[in-house]
Image: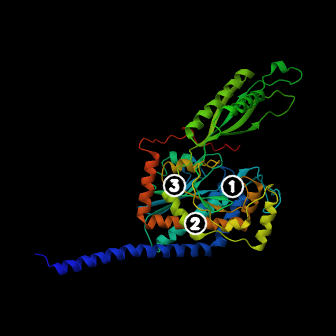
Amino acid sequence: MRNTPACFLLALMSLFAVVSHAQKPVKNLNKAKTDAIADISSQYDKYKGIALQIWDYAELGYKEVKSSALLQQTLKDKGFTVEAGVAGIPTAFVATYGSGSPVIAVLAEFDALPGLTQQAVPEKKAAEGRSSGHGCGHHLFGTASVAAGIEIKELMEKGLFKGTIKVYGCPAEEGGSGKVYMVREGLFNNVDAVIHWHPGDENTTTYDGALANKSAKFRFHGISAHASASPERGRSALDGVEAMDNMVNMMREHIPSETRIHYVITNGGKAPNVVPDFAEVYYYSRHPSREVVKDIFERIRKAGEGAAIGTETKMDFEIIGGTYDLLLNTSLAKLMQANLEQVGGFSYTDAEKTFGQSIQSTLGFKAPDIANAGKVKPLKKTENAAMGSTDVGDVSWTVPTVGMSAATWVPGTPAHSWQAVSAGGTEIGTKGMMVAAKAMTLTAIDLFMVPSNITAAKAEFDQSRGPDFKYVPLLGDRKPALNYRD
């Protein structure tokens, strides 16, 4: 027969041990977060320098040789093992530190946009020596992500937790679908959760999705001739492009209202007195549903075929990009929101307020209060997806993913504008960047130190995708479009 008092004492001791064990991670968790915020803050000048160097490079998609090399070297210097040129993309990389589970990934982007050359001044003024600019703030994106990855590594070295941290260098988000090739290559297959962010004009957790997107360049081939002396002998490739554009524009009346279709004529001929024997038009089609995007794209393709028949030209096309809609993860979003609220935004100096007010005066509408850069928006799910697209969508359907936006631009500033380029080249941009670096780091700490966070995220992820989900990239099996900006 067992000794009852002894058994009771033993049970009490066991309970005390369980309670002590449960409290210990909470204490360490808070310490890890406090240490991380302080350490990232202490390295502000370093990361500001890296971001502004990439801002100055302003390299286009798949051409980000110097930008990618700078981020890779920064990670190597801190002990990461870097695999470069992954997924058939020279500027893509995966940097790894640690071993075993969990495996947490941070996404880094660094491509600029064509035609957005701008100095870091509050008036439209082209920067000498370059024709592109960081109108979407990816110089800040890549730098903050690298900073977060390095900080997680530093905490691992201190013994606060174990596992693997990966930083993915993701080129050509702007239309090149770089991450899609990385997903297709299986580079995310063993990852437990993915963290990302994006520059913006407010501090908020991503909770409104994104549009699926499919894009292509349609090329028409005709017959050249003297446009005045013998026009009957020519067949105009430009006529083919314009006929296609006209039909697609008429189609807009008969497609779902959430659809977005936009295009640019990238080549319309060289001289008015020569019937163009070649012309090209570059199309994007978008919708919250990737299945609808597939249907819309097919209708655009048929318009191209019809235009070729009607103008007696020939048409071929090249798929350039294709991205999924964004699969949201509520449990991860709540986790990131709490960390973003802990970090908060930042306040403008008097000089930054003057700069910001000058920027806002160029917008053409009443902009939000500059003080909004210091606030964090509450977590709120909207009915409709955001009107942008991102190749993070494909990642989000492969592994549980969470993202956020930080106020790196003057409140009210639209993306892909000279005003965004301008602010991104100042401390308005780099201070906002540090908000993102800190919030991502704290979220990663929660995932490393509290396993139930990953368990909950994966359970929601599996339910959202459904048991029959099979990933099929919208861009098919084509190789990376490394020259899509040419």
Q: In this view, does 349 lie to the left or right of 196?
A: right
Q: Is residue 34 above or below residue 73?
A: below
Judge the density around disc 1: few (<14), some (14-19), many (≥20) Cα neighbours within 10 Å: many
Q: Where is residue 294 in the image (x, y as percent from the top left)?
A: 58, 35
Determine if residue 176 is in view.
yes
Q: What residue type is labelled 2?
A: Leu
Circle nearer the N terminus (1, 2): 1
Judged by depth in the image, the label closer to the viewer, 1 or 2, is 2
Q: Which residue sits at x=18%, y=81%?
A: 5
Q: Position of residue 427 (x, y in %)?
A: 72, 68
Report, in whole angstroms, how far the alpha carbon at label 1 lies from the one at label 2.
21 Å
Report, in whole angstroms, how far the alpha carbon at label 3 lies from the one at label 1.
20 Å
Looking at the rendered structure, the secondary structure element under dot 3 is: strand
For the C terminus, give its image quadrant. Answer: top right
Q: Which amino acid does label 3 sit on?
A: Thr
Circle nearer the N terminus (3, 1): 1
For the N terminus, give its image quadrant. Answer: bottom left
User: Which circle marks residue 340 in the picture?
Assistant: 2
Residue 169 appears in which quarter of the rendering?
bottom right
Query: Residue under circle 1?
Result: 136
Judged by depth in the image, the label closer to the viewer, 3 or 1, is 3
Circle nearer the N terminus (2, 3): 2
Q: What residue type is labelled 1?
A: Cys
Q: Which residue sits at x=62%, y=47%?
A: 389
Residue 378 appears in which quarter of the rendering?
bottom right
Q: How many marks?
A: 3
Report, in whole angstroms, how far the alpha carbon at label 2 lies from the one at label 3.
16 Å
User: Which circle marks residue 401 in the picture?
Assistant: 3
